[in-house]
Image (cartoon, grey):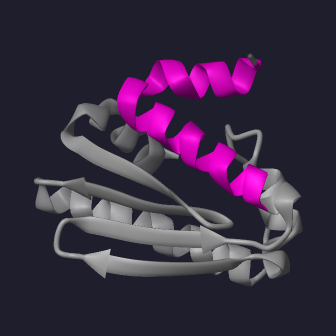
Amino acid sequence: MSSYMNLFDRHKEIKRTVEVIEGGIRTTTESDYADLVAQLQAHVSSMFTHLNQHADVTCMSSSLPTLFRNSGGYQRELTLSAKGVVVTETSSDPRLTKAIRQHAEEVSGFVRDGMPAMMRGMMGP
């Protein structure tokens, strides 16, 4: 949890772009700070490992449980870059495409707003 808190605390030092593509998204999440780059890479790599193992995680996301329950129903690719991560996620299932895009919006909110976005995720809309 402390790594999450550090990411939330330093959210203004993270840059994120989301590109809507057919069936999903491509996101780029980066930082100019080497320690944050390492933390972003470790966090996203860990999430991909959990997804591949079908191991659910406790989270502040309303879309992530759907993605974990259906991890075999969509494609995902993680590329580590010098400044962070590039993630591509797609599905031919419209329900999963919607969850993929919703999760991208949630994470973008975390990056934009930090802790308040996490609290909104925990409390609901």
Does the magenta segment cover residue 117? yes
Residue 57 visible in this rendered orientation of the protein: no
In the rendered view, would you say 78 is above or below 104?
below
Looking at the image, residue 118 sits to the left or right of residue 114; the answer is right
Task: Indicate the position of residue 82 as horizontal and vertical percent values.
Answer: 17, 74
Tell me what residue is drawn at x 81 percent, y 61 percent: 96
Q: In which quarter of the image is the C terminus?
A: top right
At 46% across and 63% down in the image, what residue appears? Answer: 43
Q: Is residue 68 above or below residue 78?
A: above
Q: Viewed as shown, does residue 57 lie left or right of 89? A: right
Residues in magenta?
A: 97-124
Q: Where is residue 18 in the image (x, y as percent from the top left)?
A: 43, 51
Q: Is residue 87 left or right of residue 32?
A: right
Count numbered badges in the picture: 0
- Is residue 45 at all visible to an observer of this figure? yes
Q: Main secondary structure of the magenta part?
A: helix
Residue drawn at the location 20% of the way across and 40% of the way down: 13
Q: In which quarter of the image is residue 24?
A: bottom right
Asked if 84 appears above or below 64 in the picture, the reply is below
Seen from the viewer's position, the closer of residues 104 and 55 is 104
Q: Is residue 123 above or below residue 10?
A: above
Q: Does the magenta stretch include residue 47?
A: no
Q: Where is residue 10 in the image (x, y as percent from the top left)?
A: 27, 36
Horizontal arrangement in the rendering, residue 62 relative to residue 117 (left or right): right
Q: Residue at x 76, y 20 (%)?
A: 124
The percent coordinates of residue 17 (x first, y second) are 35, 50
Q: Quadrant of residue 53?
A: bottom right
